[in-house]
Amino acid sequence: MHDLPAHPPAPQASLANVEGLPRQPVHARKRAVPQFQEAIRLNRTHAELHYLLARTYQKLKRLGDFRRELEVAQKVQATKREEAESLVGASGARGDPARGLGLVPPSAEKPSPPRP
């Protein structure tokens, strides 16, 4: 059975409990919807949970809900991608995000060693 515990310890636990639900028979999928909704409530920024709920809606022929949830999954994924790209850009070639963001005052930077 793929029931969520009453108080899951972490969003990862919720994901583990709902991952296989879109492949279950229709009656199990109907019961899965509130489980997905609870897992998403615990972690709204987990794109895969939104996608799995969208797939469940699609299997249940709830196409409006499917489209809406798929759009949310895509937006969450795009936001995460933008955040990751921003961090990579800020870290620069030396891999120091604090310096790339201007958070290290010039006086705190180490001077370059003298060249011979």
Image: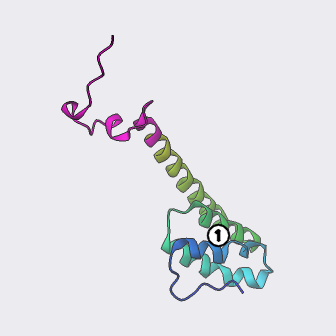
- Residue lying at the far top of the rendered structure: 116
| Residue name at image x 43 percent, y 36 percent | 95
Place of residue 63 in the rendered image (x, y in percent of width and height, measured from the top left): 70, 66
Q: Quadrant of residue 97?
A: top left
| Residue name at image x 49 percent, y 45 percent | 84
Predominant SS along the magenta part: loop
- Against 54, residue 90 (above or below) is above
Between 60 and 96, the one lying in front of the other is 96
- Quadrant where the image shows the C terminus: top left
Between 33 and 92, the one lying in front of the other is 92
Task: Please rate how many residues cluster around mark 1, counting C-alpha atoms within 10 Å: few if below 14, some from 14 to 19, many from 20.
Answer: many
Is 32 covered by the magenta stretch?
Answer: no
- Against 96, residue 8 (above or below) is below
Reading the image, the residue beneath label 1 is: 53
- Against 111, residue 37 (above or below) is below
Q: On the rendered structure, is 31 left or right of 59?
A: left
| Residue name at image x 60 percent, y 65 percent | 50
| Residues rendered magenta in the picture | 87-116
